[in-house]
Image (cartoon, rainbow, N blue to C red):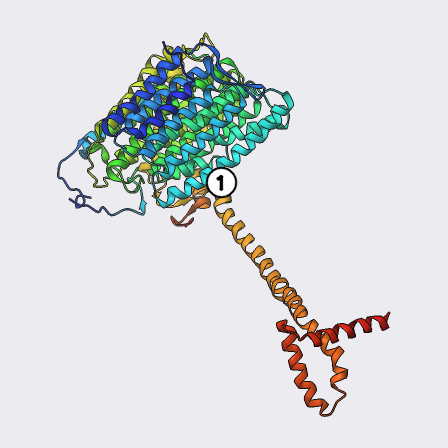
Amino acid sequence: MISPLPPAAVFILGALLIPFFKGHLRRIVMLALPVLAFINLIHLPLGDSWVVPFLGQELVLARIDRLSLVFGYIFILIGLISTIYALHVEETLQNVAGALYTGSALGVVFAGDFFSFFIFWELLTVFCVQLIWARRTRLSMGAGYRYLLFHAAGGLILLAGIVMRVHHTGSIEFGLIGLNGPGSLLIFLGLGINCAWPFVHTWLSDAYPEATITGTIFLSAFTTKAAVYALARAYPGTEALIYIGAAMAGFPIFFAVIENDLRRVLAYSLINQVGFMVCGIGIGTQLAINGAVAHAFNDVLFKGLLFMTMGAVMYRTGKINATDIGGLYRTMPLTCIFCIIGAASISAFPLFSGFVSKSMVMDAAGGEHLRLVWFILLFASAGVFHHAGIKIPYFAFFSHDSGLRPKEAPLHMLLAMGLAAFLCIFIGSFPQYLYSILPFQPVGYEPYTVPHVLAQTQILFFSALAFALLLLSGIYPAEIRCVNLDADWFYRKGGRFFYGLMDTVFNNVNRVCDQWLAKGVTGGINRFCRNAPVRISWWLLMPFYRLGKHAAEKSRHYAQTIKAAVENGVVPIGLSAAVSGLFVLLLFFLN
Amino acid sequence: MDTKTPDKKTYLFDKPKNVRRVFIFFYSTLVVLLIAEFFVHKHPHFPWEQWWGFYAVYGFVACVLLVLVAKYILRPIVKRREDYYD
Amino acid sequence: MHEEHEELMELKHDPVPGYRPIFFVAITVGLVYMGVILFNTL
């Protein structure tokens, strides 16, 4: 029996094999990776293994506990689903980057020390950017560069925090940190950037809609959820997270309502869902942490499913704006049904997966009597149904007839969507299986009580009523092709302003310096060096030339001769001896 | 719309009758949900949850305010031409 | 087949006659009732 590898190793080593295969063989290799990774994972013993000595410290490449295992399972599962979804893509770069990205996410989740955690954390960014650039449009190139810069800055903040922390504690072990001191604050912020906190969320709404159709499925699963994992590991019960999470759940829904690009609507709703998780981690009770982790698990599935259905629409029509599509239920009925299942799950309809996890966070907030937070989360629950639950399926598949009659999505896409949809309903209907893998046991939470089901159904149906009445009375905002400014304005326009400012200031400084130093001073020195010997020689010799007859004409002639001779360095020996002698005499008398 | 439609086939919701059915189902569910609340014993965290129809009204009001704020406050502030960043 | 579908700049939602009053009544009732609940319990 082969001893199990570190969880990240299966995908990373496997990814290196992908380029050597082609066609069906490559597809088999890619599908085998998640399966092998799963078999490998369940054979790893609980606790730390793959402990590698490193510079007097220990790297832990496989820390297996209940918290890391949940994230490990879901990452491998979505790795499988998105690989099935992407079977038509036969582009080595995307195939390899997808597998490496999955591997890095597993590496982050199972790292037991700061060093390997940080390495995998940075690899997430590197491979994610490949999936954005792989779309090869002008917009995706720009979004990719902004993504890279944003995460490079976040990574540096994290690194600075880690260095301070390690210096302080003397250990590179990555575990519970808690907010205490500047090092832990920097780590907190570094994790927060990947978690898309308010004002640093723009990389997400900017880049995810510009990535490739298949790449976005990977993107929606890994980066933010790895950050959620890290926060749950290092900062559970940190009060600031409650309010950060509530803000994340609240503000993106306003942007989602007026957004026209349906994948960008989903990107905003991704931030909204991560808000519930962050809030749960901040509350920090066992119920809340369980809820946050369960919601992360479910979100990977239903958000992946929604991105897949929108991807299928894009794949068949080449369009994704609400203004361009509509009425597609006619020819893409299965995709439409899968989309509605994803929408019902994200909106937390009873019997769908969101219901059994989001309510845990809500209940935890209620149990702690956090009134304001509870109201915001309830508002966000209604809002998410409004924009993700209704807007996405309605504008893509119903609404106005765009006249487009695309074919149904290809078989492998339907399979991937069907698998995710099945899991959404299965988890929603039989939550005990999900509950049994959550970090804190026993879970002891029952989502299916009569008042809870009734309350949730009421909130959703009356949100739907609001949508219907707003639409029918013509008040619902028109879908408009436009750019909606967000916090990214500050660096997208601010960056240009900064560039302009630097351009004006430094190029003018440069020009002035050029004028004064390069042309003025240097020229002066040059002239001085060239003319001084001529002048000195002339002054010394002039009295002698003036002595003879026709002194005036001759002296002019001699002046030119000396100038030419000195300038060109071809002074006759007699003349230079005379000048030197006179110069010495002059010095002698002057002294 | 018909000029753009490449086929003359009628689909499920092309018939007004089917759309009307969906709406009738929807509105009757709303009524059933409100009536059902009289028969449910609640044990909530907060006092306002005890009030009849709290969740229904909150859901409705929240969504209307969400849309109105997004349309009349947020959009005028953030909307720019499509080529704004070019 | 139409290969090129004209792309809309703006997708407006035309009002269906009769719904605007219903909407205004509903939102007024909703706001008042919500106000009453919160006034009595907060």
- What's the residue at 15%, 44% (across, down)? C1
Q: In the image, is B57 to the left or to the right of C38?
A: left
Q: Which residue is mark 1?
A: A487
Question: Which quadrant is home to the C terminus of chain A?
Answer: bottom right
Task: Please identify the quarter of the rendering in which residue A43 is found.
Answer: top left
Q: In the image, is B26 to the left or to the right of A58?
A: left
Residue A233 in the image, given as x and y percentages of width and height: 51, 19
The secondary element bearing badge 1 is classed as loop
Relative to B38, does residue A588 appear above or below in the rendering? below
Closest to the observer: A324 or A150? Answer: A150
Task: Let me know if residue A588 appears in the view.
Answer: yes
Residue A582 in the image, given as x and y percentages of width and height: 78, 75
Closest to the observer: A62 or A439? Answer: A62
Relative to A481, does residue A311 appear above or below in the rendering? above
- What's the residue at 38%, 24% (across, down)? A13
Chain ID of residue with mark 1 = A
Question: Which quadrant is home to the N terminus of chain A?
Answer: top left
- In the picture as drawn, the residue positioned furthest to the front comes out as A574
Residue B5 in the image, given as x and y percentages of width and height: 17, 42
Q: In the image, is A196 to the left or to the right of C12?
A: right
Task: Let me know if residue A195 appears in the view.
Answer: no
Relative to A591, does residue B35 appear above or below in the rendering? above
Closest to the observer: A465 or A307? Answer: A307
Amino acid residing under circle 1: Ala
Residue A350 in the image, given as x and y percentages of width and height: 35, 18
- In the picture as drawn, the residue positioned furthest to the left comes out as B8
Label 1 neighbourhood size at 10 Å, few (<14), some (14-19), many (20+)?
A: few
